[in-house]
Amino acid sequence: MIQVIDVHDLDVQAAAKIVRQSIDSIGHKILVIIHGYGSTTDQYKKLTEIRNIGKSRIKKGQIEISISGPDLNDPKVRAKFDYESLSKLQSYIVNSGVTIMKKKSNI
């Protein structure tokens, strides 16, 4: 139900490629991308690129949600996940170095 990929140690281009491929293949899973939080210039670029990919894929209608871990504190965002998913995502709620993406449900 949840797929986790860690691109923390990869350069920006390699991380972006993996994220794009993962979005295309997640099916109905929730994708958790661990990328680190802007402590270096490369980390900040990677974070920005991954968040931009998420925004772009939302505009294209490919995914429904692209949020950072702390966004899970928002009740409006939490309502878009079922209880089981939220319990598994709870460990990421304070991590700004994580982006969570979810495809649109067919319901």
Image (cartoon, grey):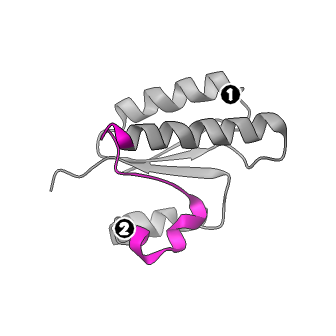
Crowding around mark 2 (Cα neighbors within 10 Å: few <14, some 14 to 19, many 20+) is: few
Q: In terms of secondary structure, where does tag 1 sit?
A: helix
Tell me which segment is drawn in magenta: 59-78
Question: Residue at the spot x=66%, y=42% of the render?
Answer: 47
> Can I make out residue 5 in this image?
no
Residue 31 placed where, x, y %?
45, 46
* Quarter assignment of residue 71: bottom right
Q: Earlier in the sequence, mark 1 or mark 2?
A: 1
Q: Is residue 21 above or below residue 91?
A: above
Q: Indicate the amino acid at tag 2.
A: Glu
Identify the amino acid type marked 1. Val
> In the shown orientation, is residue 23 left or right of residue 53?
left
SS class of the residue under badge 2?
helix
Mark 1 and mark 2 residues within 8 Å of each other at the beta carbon: no
Q: State the quadrant of the C terminus.
A: bottom left
Q: Nearer the viewer, mark 1 or mark 2?
A: 1
Q: Residue furthest right?
A: 40
Coordinates of residue 75 in the picture (x, y in percent): 43, 77
Disc number for residue 12: 1
Q: How far apart in space, not on screen, are marks 1 and 2 (Cα)? A: 32 Å
Q: Is residue 5 above or below residue 91?
A: above
Q: Residue furthest front?
A: 59
Q: Residue at x 74, y 33 (%)?
A: 9
Q: Which residue is label 2 attached to?
A: 84
Q: Is residue 85 above or below residue 25?
A: below
Mark seen at residue 76: none
